[in-house]
Image: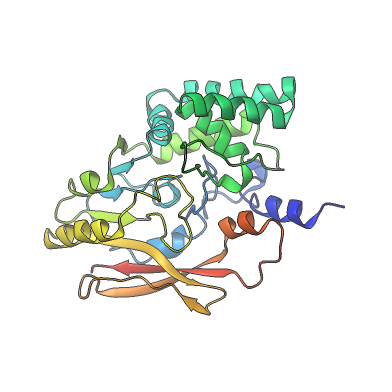
Amino acid sequence: MRSTAIRQQLELFEPEDLPLSIMAQPKPFRTQLLKWVGNKQKQADSIIKFFPKQFDTYFEPFLGSGGVLGVLAPEKAVASDIFEPLVQIWQMLHSDKEELKRQYAERYALIVQLGKKAAYAKVLTSYNQEPNGADLLFLCRACYGGVVRFRKNDGFMSTPVGVHDPVSPDSFGIRTDIWHNRTRGTRFLHLDFAAAMNQAKCGDLIYCDPPYSDSQTILYGAQAFSLPRLFDTITSCKARGVYVVLSIDGTKYSGRKLCDIAIPEGLFEREEFVSVGRSMLKRFQMDGKTLEDHEVRDRLLLTF
């Protein structure tokens, strides 16, 4: 029988990694291009229902795996991230989707040659020597739960390989075609969040899903992220007539803890809570222990 730790790892890949032919189409849209901790794709419908009924350009300045972007599939969007290898994946999706498929297939083929653990270690070493989107694509699909984390002392990615089998090149190719079509109207940019948000004009909509200060300090870019700076940028956007929706720390320990965040008075007009379920990052940190006491709700703050 599978150990508890293995079963809990595999839970992270259901139902998204079921064969695409048996998944419900087209809604709810759950087909992921990337595996990424904190991905909001399962909660996207609950988040989108709070968006204004009409808006112009959609902005997502903390792109990650683009969960909300993919479900929303806006006609016109600007999606960006400060993490350059990640942005390289998204830009390749648009500039040459067949090359993106080839990059994944090339690294996946190492599993047959070397075995999964050795293949993962080889690609991880390559990435840490020279960070790039092609290696990161395979690593985020093969690592434990999409927990893309980096060591503070040298910046090396340190996530171990997952117990699951990464999706096949054929399956990834289908995902690539789907995501290429759903993001056809999106420009993907390598930008700091403030530089991206400063492009938004009156009537545009920004959805922010930054690293969470209470739970995601080990993840990429989290150590350098400044929440007060984000609040200042949102203040400027609101003054220009831009709609802003912010996902931020809400409750954890099944509602027994309300995460203490200093929120500027008067900046947001509404507060909502969205159920996230059990923390994937906590699963990684607890290494197989029970998670009944780790139900999480995100706080959704709106400037309108």
Rendering coords of residue 131 (x, y %)? 45, 28
Depth check: give the residue in front, 154 or 274. Answer: 154
> Can see residue 254?
yes
Colour scheme used in the picture? rainbow
User: For the point 29% across and 44% down, which residue is it?
Assistant: 77
Residue furthest toward the left?
Answer: 240
Residue furthest toward the right?
Answer: 1
User: For the point 50% across and 24% down, which residue is it?
Assistant: 129
Rendering coords of residue 37 (x, y %)? 52, 50
User: For the point 12% across and 58% down, which residue is it?
Assistant: 240
Rendering coords of residue 166 (x, y %)? 65, 36
Is 241 left or right of 33, judged from the image as shown?
A: left
288 above or below 141?
A: below
Depth check: give the residue in front, 98 or 6. Answer: 6
Depth check: give the residue in front, 297 or 213. Answer: 213
Is 204 left or right of 30, judged from the image as shown?
A: left
127 above or below 235?
A: above
